[in-house]
Amino acid sequence: MTQARALRHELKDYEARQLLALRALRRDQRELGPSAAAPRLTLGERVADRVAATMGSWPFIVTQTVMLAIWIGLNITAFVQRWDPYPFILLNLALSFQAAYAAPFIMMSQNRRQDIDRQQAATDYRVNVKAELEVELLHEKLDHLRENEVLALTQAVERLTELLQEARTPARAKRGRSRAPG
């Protein structure tokens, strides 16, 4: 029994307070619903997400590749009107312009996604702490139940031993009287 007490999981005061705070936070989140968890996006954030999603898609890559092939093909094969001859300086300028504007949009979208991931990691951490504390509480309850069960079994064994002793004592007394000369 003392060994069970030595192994017993007990929550410290700060752990118990943290568990209560996490339970209250979870209750509040359930009451607010899923719409409260999703923040409203500003116009810039929506544009950045849309640009990043568009530029990171296969349709955009295929479309841009086709347009570049047409541009180069027309400028190489067009005998009459070459608006951008071989070094393709105008095409290079257009692609540089596109990259110069696309990069900040993509970075803004990635930064926002990183903030969302950071918030999810913090939420996951809180959930893990709560789960750990809940498991410790379950261990404590199981240890308490086991101690009570062992105590009840020990008392039952002691009571049965007493009853067995009482049952043997009159039987011995009867045997002792029957052996005595008389």
Image: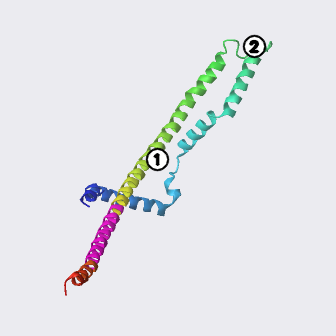
Quadrant of the image occupied by residue 61: top right
The residue tagged 2 is 76
- Residue closest to the far front: 181
Quadrant of the image occupied by residue 10: bottom left
- In terms of depth relative to the viewer, which is nearer, 24 or 144? 144
Whole-angstrom CA distance, mark 1 to mark 2, is 52 Å
Q: Quadrant of the C terminus?
A: bottom left
**Rendered location of residue 89, percent (x, y):** 64, 16
**Rendered location of residue 126, percent (x, y):** 40, 51
Q: Is residue 161 magenta?
A: yes
Q: Considering only order in the chain, which callout, 2 or 1, is on the residue closer to the N terminus? A: 2
- In terms of depth relative to the viewer, which is nearer, 131 or 140? 140
Q: Which mark is residue 23?
A: none
| Magenta stretch: dominant secondary structure | helix
User: Could you tell me the amino acid type at mark 2?
Assistant: Ile
Residue shown at 70%/25% (left/top)? 65
**Rendered location of residue 111, percent (x, y):** 48, 38
**Above-or-below relation of 169 to 149:** below
- Is 180 placed left or right of 45 in the picture? left
The residue tagged 1 is 120
Quadrant of the image occupied by residue 48: top right
Element under disc 1: helix
Q: Residues within 10 Å of mark 1 (few under 14, many from 20)?
A: few
The span picked out in magenta is: 142-166
Q: Nearer the viewer, mark 1 or mark 2?
A: 1
Q: Is residue 125 magenta?
A: no
**Rendered location of residue 2, percent (x, y):** 24, 59
User: Could you tell me the amino acid type at mark 1?
Assistant: Gln
- In terms of depth relative to the viewer, which is nearer, 177 or 161? 177
- Is 72 placed left or right of 150 in the picture? right
